[in-house]
Image (cartoon, rainbow, N blue to C red):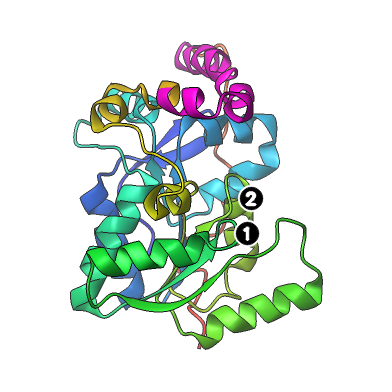
Amino acid sequence: MVSKAPRVNILGVGVNAVTLEDTVATVTETIGSGVQEYVCVVPAHSVMECVRDPSLRPVFNGAGVCTPDGMAIVWLLKLHGHRKVGRVYGPDLMLAVCERSIAAGWRHFFLGGATGVAEELVLRLEARFPGLQVAGTLSPPFRPLSPTEDDEMVALVNASRPHIVWVGLGSPKQERWMAEHAGRIAAPVMAGVGAAFDFLSGRKAQAPRWAQRSGLEWLFRWADEPLRLFPRYARYPLFAALVAAQATGLRRFEMSDRAAPEGHRRAGP
């Protein structure tokens, strides 16, 4: 089921004006609906990836819900008049859905992370949420898979019969993976949650809540991984300039390449 919340065009990417509670509700409805959707969490970095590579736009716009992950995106949605909107951060979404799943009986599959990370993540989640049902874990190699390897991976995931597959391959790789495997992975929901695997497993430190709420999380993460993250954050001034150009009508960004409509995918057997 596609989110009912309106989408705001941010440089050609349609981001839903939602809260964490809205997103958990959409996940709940999707699992019960018989259709399959995927969830993208969208920070400014992902929007800029779509500007750099327009072929990514239908990948994000084809998601059942694109959540505002990053205060810059939240503030833009508020400027568009959507007052009831909040940050839907990948780690927070995983925790909220895991908590909801205890009563619902959902099974989780964790796909991504370096070797051992998914297993460490599961241990921490099971300690935090007794009774959590884990269908399986898999850390695929970083190299491209052969068609045979990909078929074997899909068969492994489907044999575990999960309700939700958490995909932690990094953006935009995880979004492309979900779009390419929609209809092949039988789980009703796939969710790309990026660094949630590293943060919630304890491999990397999360920014303090005050830094997350104030929009300074990027500074905390940059200090932790300056070489890896510098190219990403160096594009933020361009992001601000493009947003201003879109707002003033100096440049147009179309969302006309949105992928198939609601109900286009049926969950597998």
Q: Is residue 152 visible?
A: yes
Q: Are marks 1 and 2 in contact (CB under 8 Å)?
A: yes
**Which is nearer the eye, 141 or 6?**
141
Magenta stretch holds residue 242? yes
**Which is nearer the eye, 123 or 104?**
123
Q: Residues within 10 Å of mark 2 (few under 14, many from 20)?
A: few
In the image, is 230 to the left or to the right of 142? left
Q: Quadrant of the N terminus?
A: bottom left
Q: Residues within 10 Å of mark 1 (few under 14, many from 20)?
A: some
The magenta span reads 220-248
Magenta stretch holds residue 253? no
Above or below, comparing residue 269 to residue 232 in the picture = below
Q: Secondary structure at mark 2?
A: helix
Q: Which residue is mark 2?
A: 173
Amino acid carrying label 1: it is Trp
Q: Secondary structure at mark 1?
A: helix
Q: Is residue 262 visible?
A: no
